[in-house]
């Protein structure tokens, strides 16, 4: 980009101000040609739409050598890969946490069931027999009595 004005028609730079007269901002390039290289630019200029502010631009850092460019690009690629890997690990962690919560709920349910079984087994045998077997025993005895009574007629 050139250091000439796009919108305001003036061709000057007053210290830390762009051609619009507002303070400039320092940004970092993310292109593979100038990776990580800092530059000064108009705060209002949108490089995507090419609208707003002026087109003031000046490299803040000195020129990079080819080997610096290659190293920075490789580091940027590695950084991107590590960020993707981190994102996957965070998703895996979220899945494991969900499974852990599900298992805690299942353990609580099983502990309640175990307590119920223990409570039933802790009742005296007489109470258990009376509760379950007594009506069955009465029915069986009644049937035997009725069969014996029927044979006597």
Image (cartoon, rainbow, N blue to C red):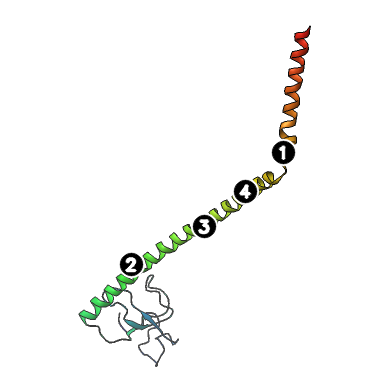
Q: Which residue is mark 1?
A: 128
* Label 4 or label 3, whichever comes before in sequence order: 3
Instruction: Sort mark 2 into few (<14), some (14-19) or many (20+) by Cα contacts within 10 Å.
Output: few
Q: CA distance from mark 1 to mark 3?
A: 38 Å
Instruction: Sort mark 3 into few (<14), some (14-19) or many (20+) by Cα contacts within 10 Å.
Output: few
**The residue tagged with tag 1: helix, strand or loop?**
helix
Q: Which residue is mark 4?
A: 114
For discs 2 and 3, the disc positioned in front in the rendered view: 3
Above/below status of 3 relative to 153: below
- The answer to which image quadrant residue 45 occupies is bottom left
* Label 1 or label 2, whichever comes before in sequence order: 2
In terms of depth relative to the viewer, which is nearer, 15 or 90? 90
Instruction: Sort mark 4 into few (<14), some (14-19) or many (20+) by Cα contacts within 10 Å.
Output: few
Side of 72 where 108 appears, left or right? right
Q: Are marks 2 and 3 in contact (CB under 8 Å)?
A: no
Q: CA distance from mark 2 to mark 4?
A: 49 Å
* Label 2 or label 4, whichever comes before in sequence order: 2
In which quadrant is the C terminus drawn? top right
Q: Are marks 2 and 4 in contact (CB under 8 Å)?
A: no
* Label 2 or label 3, whichever comes before in sequence order: 2
């Amino acid at each position: 980009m050139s250091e000439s004005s796009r919108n305001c028609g003036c061709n000057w730079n007053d210290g830390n101000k762009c051609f619009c007269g507002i303070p400039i901002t320092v940004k970092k390039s993310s292109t593979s040609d100038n990776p990580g290289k800092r530059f000064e630019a108009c705060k209002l200029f949108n490089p995507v739409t090419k609208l707003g502010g002026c087109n003031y631009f000046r490299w803040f850092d000195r020129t990079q050598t080819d080997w610096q460019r290659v190293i920075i690009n490789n580091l940027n690629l590695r950084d991107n890969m590590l960020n993707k890997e981190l994102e996957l690990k965070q998703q895996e962690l979220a899945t494991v946490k969900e499974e852990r919560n599900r298992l805690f709920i299942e353990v609580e349910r099983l502990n309640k069931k175990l307590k119920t079984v223990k409570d039933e087994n802790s009742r005296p045998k007489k109470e258990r027999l009376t509760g379950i077997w007594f009506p069955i025993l009465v029915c069986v005895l009644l049937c035997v009595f009725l069969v014996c009574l029927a044979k006597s007629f």
